[in-house]
Amino acid sequence: MGGPNAQSTLETGRAGWTTGELARRLNAELRGPSDLAITRVEGIDRADESTLTFVRDAKHVASWERSRAGAAVVSRSIEVVPGPGRAVLIVDDADIAMITLLEAMTPVRHQPGAGAHPGACIDPDAEVHPEARIGPGVVVGPGTRIGARAVLNANVVVGANVRIGEDSELRSGVVVEDRCVIGRRVRIHANAVIGADGFGYRPSPDGRGLVKIPHAGHVEIGDDVEIGANTNIDRGKFGPTVIGEGSKIDNLVQIGHNCRIGRACIICGACGLSGSVVVGDGAVLAGGVGVADSMIIGAGARVGAGSGVMDNIPDGEAWVGYPAMPVRQTMRIIASMRQAPDVFQRLKRTGALGPDA
């Protein structure tokens, strides 16, 4: 329903809207006054009479009734009464409607001007489209091609023979190492590293140290992917590490060498995938999931936060726990553990455990 910093003005440069205008913008059914002035969007617990909030599910209806909010965007499946002097905007999906408003409200992010900043260092053998935007301190290596309207913000470093597609944006401090391929409309947040060496070592022949395994592959990132800040995606040992089209990867994620992430996957913050992991289309890994080498997570699978995946997960299944197991199995184990002290005491009272228990 919005955190303590969720407040936002409705649109840059505009003082506010009326509920009627908002209803038209969202193609919503309006119940209540159409001339109610709305100046900001806020979570329901921090809303006042000039605030638009939203009610996505039935459990928040009581919060709406207690709140001071002037108006709410409400999913059609929920019954909400406006009340005197208040309005509700009925839409098919409140979350989607709020996304529409937030897109209008979010200020345009500052970007470098068209062309290359004088402080950029671009190799003469690189090909940079004239419509690309290259910020100060950017380094572009030989043989690299940067597509139309791509944006490289300050201090991005791009190695040799890299491909960056049209309309992609690399935020400040991103590093893309040699031979990696970035698709179209990809967004990579600050300080992510694409194409670092995979983590591979073997004991040296004399047994006195470790020998580094070379990683001759690269990384391929499909169209419409978003990669969070400080995430690392390692290059393959032989072929590529692949991130499928439309997948979204959160901050502080580690993707090991030769992983293959499918289309439209979600990988939340602090996940760690060891080498050669396969994640099927549409799978979701919640925060802090760890995945062992060469595991296969099926299409549409769900893995709960903090889980440790040490076995393959079939398509469409939900697993959780450490080690991860199907949700029902894990819940039975947890229930048994909670009952164990009482069971122990009953057995002890009956003498079934013997005198030394």
Image (cartoon, helix red, strand yellow):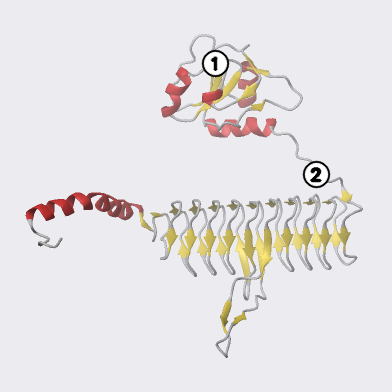
Q: Pointers 1 and 2 in contact (CB under 8 A)? A: no
Q: Give the image quarter of residue 9.
A: top right
Q: Secondary structure at mark 2?
A: loop
Dot 1 corresponds to which residue? 87
Q: Classify residue 183 as left or right of residue 338.
A: right
Q: Amino acid at mark 1?
A: Ala
Asked whether 59 or 26 is in front, the reply is: 59
Q: Position of residue 303 (x, y in %)?
A: 44, 54
Asked whether 134 or 137 is in front, the reply is: 137
Between circles 1 and 2, the one closer to the viewer is 2
Which residue extends farthest left? 350
Dot 2 corresponds to which residue? 111
Q: Classify residue 100 as left or right of residue 278.
A: right
Give the vertical position of 16 relative to 166 (above or below).
Answer: above
Q: Residue at (68%, 66%) from the top-left corner?
A: 195
Q: Position of residue 100 (x, y in %)?
A: 63, 32
Q: Classify residue 177 as left or right of residue 48.
A: right
Q: Secondary structure at mark 1?
A: strand
Q: Residue at (70%, 57%) from the top-left corner?
A: 183
